[in-house]
Image (spheres, rainbow, N blue to C red):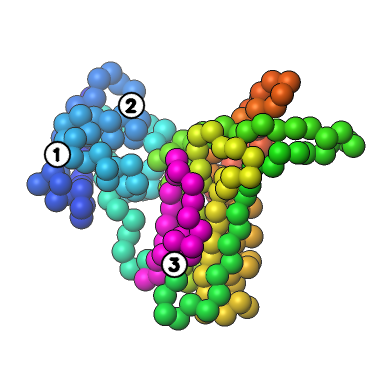
Amino acid sequence: MQVKVLLFATLKDRVGQNQLTVRLPGDSSTVADVRDALVALHPALQPNLGTAVSAVNQEFAFAGDPVRDGDEVAFFPPVSGGSMDYPEIFQIATMPIDLDALVAAITIPATGAVCVFSGMVRGETTKQAIVEQTQRLEYEAYEPMAVAKMRQVAIEIRQRFPGVQGIAMVQRVGDLAVGENTVIIACASGHRDQGCFEGARYGIDRLKEIVPVWKKEVRPDGSAWVEGHYTPEAADRGDI
């Protein structure tokens, strides 16, 4: 099968053209397969495709979405304008998070307040009056989709709290020791009563629902993956 691929902005510049045909083996492929085929053809695209937005036949699409023979698949950076007038950071990180640097990156001269939520590796958890010990956590993410869903959460924050300025969402992956940051949600605003508190709270709650990140608890008596209970619905696709 083959699909028509459209590239925009930085991706177009790296390849030197905005349209090409990509051939894929078999009759069943996904957006992720198209990404992989593009990287194989044009290795210079790899740094940008990881965070690029994708669309199939002019509708937002994610890594696991199917593509069919003759489909039009587009890749482009996050759209400029609108909320992007304010700084935004969406990252999957393997190194410790510098909170001061992160806050500085999402503030502008008009910023007067920043609310930061920081998740931590907890060493003790009380369940039914029993204290369970945690030695470390292992985090794993479906990275391209996780970054895309972080962007969706930021859009939702702005819809609910229009006074929010800069937004940062950073999720750690890998082995994390007790006391280390696991996730950061930061929202800036002109004043403390313009949505920064509410935006950060909404951000972490929503991240726990739709951003594909998992953790394994490593305890003295063994280890186990921790699974959530929220099942995404059609409205969570973010086709807005």
Which amino acid does the dot numbered 2 rest on? Ser
Determine whether the residue tagged by mark 1 lies in a helix, strand or loop.
strand
Which amino acid does the dot numbered 3 rest on? Ala
Q: Residue at x 28, y 18 (%)?
A: 26
Name the residue at the right extreme. 129
Give how far apart the Cα atoms at labels 3 and 2 are. Answer: 42 Å
Give how far apart the Cα atoms at labels 2 and 1 are. Answer: 17 Å
Residue 193 at x, y percent in the picture: 63, 78
Name the residue at the top extreme. 26
Give the residue pinned by disc 3.
104
Q: Quadrant of the C terminus?
A: bottom left
Which labelled disc corresponds to residue 29?
2
Q: Is residue 88 left or right of residue 212?
A: left
Q: What range is drawn magenta here?
A: 85-105
Which amino acid does the dot numbered 1 rest on? Leu
Indicate whether residue 170 is drawn in magenta.
no
Give how far apart the Cα atoms at labels 3 and 1 are. Answer: 40 Å
- What is the count of numbered marks? 3
Give the residue pinned by disc 1.
20
Nearer-N-terminus badge (3/1) = 1
Above or below for 78 versus 129: below
Nearer-N-terminus badge (2/1) = 1
Residue 10 at x, y percent in the picture: 20, 53
Q: Residue at x 90, y 37 (%)?
A: 129
Q: Nearer the viewer, residue 26 or 227?
A: 227
Residue 69 at x, y percent in the picture: 26, 29
Q: Residue at x 40, y 70 (%)?
A: 86
